[in-house]
């Protein structure tokens, strides 16, 4: 049997049965490329998702930043890597392209912050020593915002406050001389309660703008009555108020800072909201002066010198400060009142009733102005006095001059009322010395000198006579006979002494004299009755019987 012999028992296929179309047939060979495509797509997706998020960082200086080497860290864990470093289109900054790992994508929030970590030596100490060998890296501090972000600025210094720290941000405005640096401390009564976060200069207003952060719970210390001032660490001042030394903390001594507080004469006030604006004063005195916002302005027309009188000098009434010198001089070229006979130096002063402990609500400036006008008529005058003999600093003293001969005449200078003045202090002493010198110059000195010459000649002749007497006396004392006078005098004194010894109580002569005196005394006592009888009846000397009557003479018969 050949190969082409049909099998008898083989059944012929049913031609009517349906056959599959060529389009519906899938060859198994296509499974391999299909699986390869799926694997490739999965690899692409995995590679894309594993690469992380691409972000753009901008910084002023890319010092220490290298593409492929500089890492991005958060809490000291590496979460990304810098891929490219280039200049911006305007060439004003450096643009850094970095990729963040997928698991750290949640850290990229609207308020997230980046800064460069590198070795630093500052007032707070030494930091970033670990980057000496490994190189600088970029630190990420995650924010708390719900919005995401992909472009961030990079700071050269670490932030003052960490994200989420409780506290309050305050804006300070100051002149250029009171500028601060980022990181400077903010202290309250010597205790650090915050830091300076930002510092910028506005060329249009020519002022410095500082943003400071004050931590909780110290944020309650900032009220609408709070005053901020610069603290230079040590403040030495020698002025009309004397010598003062104020020393802050060691940190402010090295780099300065900000201090704040509420002046004693102001209420504590109410807490402020975040972003409140305050003025930054140069020192505590300037901050205190800023509280006296209600005042009266007067002009002093000073005829004396104003050397030693400066802006800020006190205005006192009998030792109590009631004002401040505002300007020296003030509007120097303005025309002066016609009533004045001489040119004077104008000085602007401010009288501040708030210094007397009066509340703002109780101050009526018009009433105070009328009160001062009445006191002008009673003799209230201003004068310059020396407040410090070492520096020659002057201050304005107000007092009543009862003996003034000038009547008060109201006048104005450049729109301000003129405060009447008198000479005082060294100027008054100088004028008195000048008057004394004028009187001395008016004296006729030549006759006085001639009289003094004649007096000197007479004195010279007298001295010559005294010299001659002295020589004669010396000759007399040197004579031997004069020397013998002393011996004779001694002999005479010895004889006198022996004579006096002869009349001493123990000598016989003294005893004889005493007995004679005693006998004489007894004789006198014996004669006393006879004398008394004769005084009473003188006839007792002739008649023995005193009771008989006197005979009556008769004529002979």
Image (cartoon, rainbow, N blue to C red):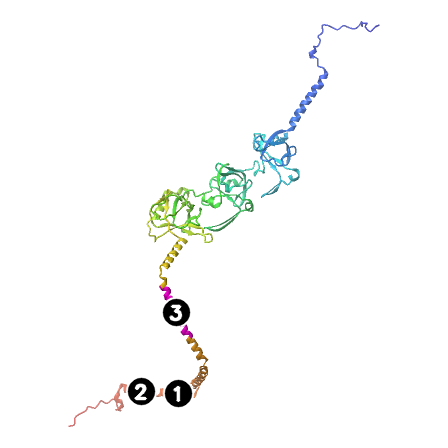
Find the magenta span and give its range: 447-467
- Residue, disc 2: 529
Residue 23: percent from left, percent from top:
69, 12
Q: Earlier in the sequence, mark 3 or mark 1?
A: 3
Which residue reaches farthest right?
Answer: 1
Residue 526: percent from left, percent from top:
33, 88
Distance in Å between CA atoms under marks 2 and 1: 26 Å
In this rendering, the count of numbered labels is: 3
**Label 1, residues with CA under 10 Å away: few <14, some 14-19, many ≥20:** few
Q: Is residue 429 above or below residue 81?
A: below
Q: Indicate left or right for 276 with 546 as reference.
A: right
Q: Is residue 549 above or below residue 460?
A: below
Q: Could you say whether the residue bearing mark 1 is in a helix, strand or loop? A: helix
Residue 314 visible to the viewer: yes
Residue 161: percent from left, percent from top:
56, 38
Residue 271 visible to the viewer: no
- Residue, disc 3: 457
| Residue name at image x 27 percent, y 85 percent | 536
Q: Could you say whether the residue bearing mark 2 is in a helix, strand or loop? A: helix
Q: Indicate left or right for 391 with 400 as reference.
A: right
**Label 3, residues with CA under 10 Å away: few <14, some 14-19, many ≥20:** few
**Label 2, residues with CA under 10 Å away: few <14, some 14-19, many ≥20:** few
Q: Earlier in the sequence, mark 3 or mark 2?
A: 3
Residue 294 within the segment the image draws in magenta: no
Q: Could you say whether the residue bearing mark 3 is in a helix, strand or loop? A: helix
Q: Indicate left or right for 521 with 54 as reference.
A: left
Q: Indicate left or right for 145 with 529 as reference.
A: right
Q: Earlier in the sequence, mark 2 or mark 1?
A: 1
Give the number of the disc on residue 513: 1
């Amino acid at each position: 049997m050949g190969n082409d012999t049909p099998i008898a028992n083989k059944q012929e296929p049913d031609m009517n049965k349906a056959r599959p179309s060529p389009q519906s047939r899938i060859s198994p060979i296509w499974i391999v490329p299909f699986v390869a495509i799926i694997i490739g797509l999965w690899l692409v997706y995995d590679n894309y998702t594993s690469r992380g998020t691409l972000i753009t960082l901008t910084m002023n200086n890319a010092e220490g930043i290298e593409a492929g080497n500089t890492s991005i860290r958060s809490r000291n864990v590496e979460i990304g890597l810098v891929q490219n470093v280039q200049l911006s289109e305007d060439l004003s900054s450096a643009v850094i392209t970095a990729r963040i790992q997928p698991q750290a994508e949640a850290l990229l929030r609207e308020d997230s912050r980046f800064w460069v970590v590198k070795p630093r030596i500052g007032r707070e100490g030494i930091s970033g020593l670990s980057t000496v060998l490994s190189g600088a890296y970029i630190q990420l501090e995650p924010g708390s915002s719900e919005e995401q972000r992909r472009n961030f600025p990079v700071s050269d210094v670490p932030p003052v406050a960490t994200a989420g720290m409780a506290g309050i941000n305050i804006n300070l405005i100051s002149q250029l001389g009171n500028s601060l640096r980022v990181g400077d401390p903010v202290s309250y009564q010597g205790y650090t309660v915050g830091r300076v976060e930002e510092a910028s200069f506005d060329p249009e207003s020519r002022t410095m703008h500082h943003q400071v952060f004050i931590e909780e719970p110290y944020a309650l210390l900032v009220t609408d009555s709070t005053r901020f001032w610069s603290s230079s660490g040590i403040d030495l001042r020698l002025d009309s108020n004397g010598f003062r030394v104020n020393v802050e903390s060691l940190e402010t001594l090295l780099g300065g800072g900000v201090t704040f507080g509420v002046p004693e004469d102001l209420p504590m006030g109410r807490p402020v909201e975040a972003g409140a604006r305050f003025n930054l004063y140069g020192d505590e005195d300037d901050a205190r002066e800023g509280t006296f916002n209600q005042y009266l302005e007067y002009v002093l027309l000073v005829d004396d010198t104003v050397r030693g009188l400066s802006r800020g000098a006190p205005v006192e009434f009998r030792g109590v400060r009631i004002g401040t010198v505002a300007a020296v001089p003030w509007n120097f070229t303005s025309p002066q009142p016609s009533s004045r006979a001489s040119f004077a130096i104008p000085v602007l002063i401010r009288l501040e009733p708030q210094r007397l402990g009066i509340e703002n609500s109780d101050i009526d400036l018009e009433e105070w102005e009328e009160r001062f006008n009445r006191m002008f008529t009673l003799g209230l005058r201003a004068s310059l006095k020396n407040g410090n003999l070492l520096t020659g600093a002057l201050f304005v003293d107000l007092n009543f001059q009862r003996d003034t001969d000038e009547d008060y005449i109201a006048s104005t200078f450049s729109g301000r009322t003129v405060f009447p003045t008198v000479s005082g202090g060294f100027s008054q002493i100088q004028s008195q010395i000048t008057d004394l010198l004028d009187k001395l110059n008016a004296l006729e000195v030549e006759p006085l000198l001639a009289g003094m010459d004649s007096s000197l000649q007479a004195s010279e002749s007298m001295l010559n006579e005294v010299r001659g007497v002295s020589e004669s006396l010396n000759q007399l004392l040197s004579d031997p006979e004069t020397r013998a006078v002393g011996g004779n005098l001694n002999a005479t004194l010895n004889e006198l002494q022996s004579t006096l010894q002869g009349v001493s109580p123990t000598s016989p002569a003294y005893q004889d004299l005493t007995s004679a005196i005693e006998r004489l005394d007894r004789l006198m006592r014996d004669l006393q009755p006879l004398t008394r009888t004769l005084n009473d009846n003188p006839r007792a000397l002739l008649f023995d019987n005193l009771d008989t009557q006197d005979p009556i003479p008769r004529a002979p018969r």
